[in-house]
Image (tube, coloured by chain):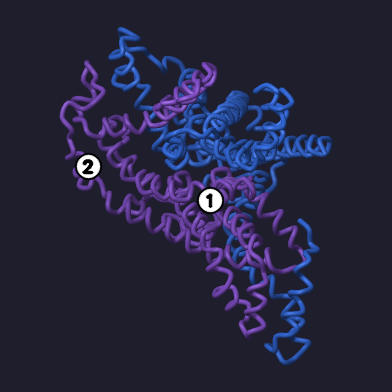
Chain colours: A purple, B blue
Amino acid sequence: MTQTVKKPVSVKKTVLRLLLYFVVLDVCIITLYPYFAMLCTALKSREEIFSAAGTVLPITALWSNFIDIWSRAPMAKYMLNSILIAGGSTIIAMLCGIPAAYALARMKFKGQTAFLGFVIVSQMFAPVVLLIGIYQVMQVLHLTDSILGLVFINAAFNQAFTIWLLRGTFMGISADMEQAATIDGCNRIQSMMKVLLPVAAPGIVTTLIFIFINAWNEYTVALCLISTDTLKPLTVGINIFNGYNIIEWQYLFAASIFAIIPVVILFMCIEKNLVSGLASGGVKG
Amino acid sequence: MSTKTPAAPADRQVQTASPRLPNPGSRKFFRTIEPYIWIAPSIILMAIFIVTPIFKVFQLSMNKVTRAGKLKGFNNFENFTTVIKDPSFALVLKNTILWTVAVVVLSTLLGFILALFLNNEFKGRKVARAIVVFPWATTLVIQASAWKFIVNTDYGTLNTLLMRMGIISAPMNWTSTPAAWFGWEIACGIFVTIPFVCFCVLSGLQSIDASYYEAATVDGAGYFQKLFKITLPLVKSSLTVSTVLNIIYVFNSFPIIWTMTKGDPANRTDTLVTYLYKLAFYNGKQGEASAVSVIGFIILLMCASVYMIYTLRKGDEDL
């Protein structure tokens, strides 16, 4: 704080200012602490982690842990699976969600309110309580133990969020331009693709990234449906280091850091847009 | 949702003006079914992967089910009575309520206070906001693993840190009882839920007109008067949204408890979702597990609707 002030500042104000910095700083430290602990542990040797005289910082940073995990577990496979699942879910959720949101924002039809109501109510059913049902459906479709199965599940459970957020975005954009385009001879699909979607791009990107993150972070369904090791996503796969008898903390956390970094970066990009969308839309992914 | 949007008639004129389909009859028919074509992919996706499982779960809960998942006919709600009679179910239900109430109430309170702090102008505000978002973006299973490691008695970093700082002299056993484990799980749950509440409230706070506060200051209102008379009523809708959603998500939260204790020992840290997961996939009791699912839906539906009716009614009074 630079208090090079000419006019006298009241003591109360300074105290409040200090309190503000104190609280915010504490919150930041506590928030970052688990990540700090993870990073430090990922850089230690197994002996150092379990040594009686514990250390906070690693004695010597063992960066080789970050390399070892790639040979000790099919990390590259896990990574690829996570990318496929998250990417696939995002594509399908958007392909289904954009037209639905468009219809809700631009057309009037019977059952519109009912559809919207269903979209909201569907939020109440988390995949975990439906797992038994999901498992049976997947058996019928021969999609257990398959990445495609997870893609569909993630896409379906993210529909509510996708539709709600995109509908809000589309409704916030005037339909005048699209109507002008229609008069110029565009059909609905053309006017949507050429006029609406470019204008709605920020909202679409926010939605897209958020679905990607949700699918990337999904754990429960993948845990239940996937049994082949090489088909697991990162969230499930890294638990290979988290055995019943031996937990290889250094590898677990090194792998975790690979799983966290892309998501945190993506999240920070959309944080601002996402929050206003969530608050107005009333959906959490 | 208002079904009478003023844009609709204009839309229709444009449609009539467009010379796409020559036959007026088929054009009219197409216009009637067109919206349904647009929503069809979404409906199909949700019908297969959400509605069918819901239907399946209800069906399984009503039937005698073999270990392989085959239905053997209606069994007079026997699954429900078996589940409810099991003494561990009462424990699990109690845990679930404690878990949901503790996490939702405390994270809402702390998230709200944090939002009040972050709403001030100060140096490094952007950085602070970016840091606060971290736990929201991190997958729960990794967050929970980190906590499990931190609180470990033998090699956990919490003990190391406190000993280095001279606060304690010997390692503390932070997880001596199942209740202690459950407490840490709740703490972890609060930790990961705060960012969502905080950002919902922040978006509400940022839409409040500063002139309200100026007027109140002129009238001599103190900080807490302003907080309760201006801030709270105006962010109420944001808080309602975040609370209702948190009730649903925390109630259904699986990874934290699964990673830290798997509900052990002897169901002492189980909630409904971990309990039903074990019933279904460890013990092969799919009928009973489905009954637990259905009980969960009913509780959730009651909580969510009571809360919504309450807040809606209160909202009307304020108007």
Q: Which residue is mark 1?
A: A273
- Residue A147 in sight: yes
Q: Chain of mark 1?
A: A
Whole-percent x and y of residue B124? Answer: 42, 35
| Residue A31 location (% of width, % of height) | 42, 30
- Quarter-of-image position of residue A190: bottom right
Q: Residue at x 47, y 18 (%)?
A: B180
User: In the depicted view, which residue is nearer to us: B140 or A58?
Assistant: A58
Q: Position of residue B287 (x, y in %)?
A: 60, 42
Residue matched to label 2: A66
Q: Is residue A114 left or right of residue A199?
A: right
Label ID, residue B206 = none
A21 to B21, vertically: above or below: above
Give x and y (percent) for residue A257.
32, 41
Q: Secondary structure at mark 1?
A: helix
CB within 8 Å, label 2 to label 1: no
Q: Looking at the picture, which amino acid does disc 1 mark?
A: Asn
Using a 10 Å C-alpha cutoff, classify the residue at mark 1 as few (fewer than 14 neighbours), some (14 to 19) or many (20 or more).
Answer: some
Marks 2, 1 in one chain: yes
> Judging from the image, what secondary structure is the residue with disc 2 in?
helix
Structural distance between the alpha carbons of marks 2 and 1: 34 Å
* Three-letter residue code for mark 2: Phe
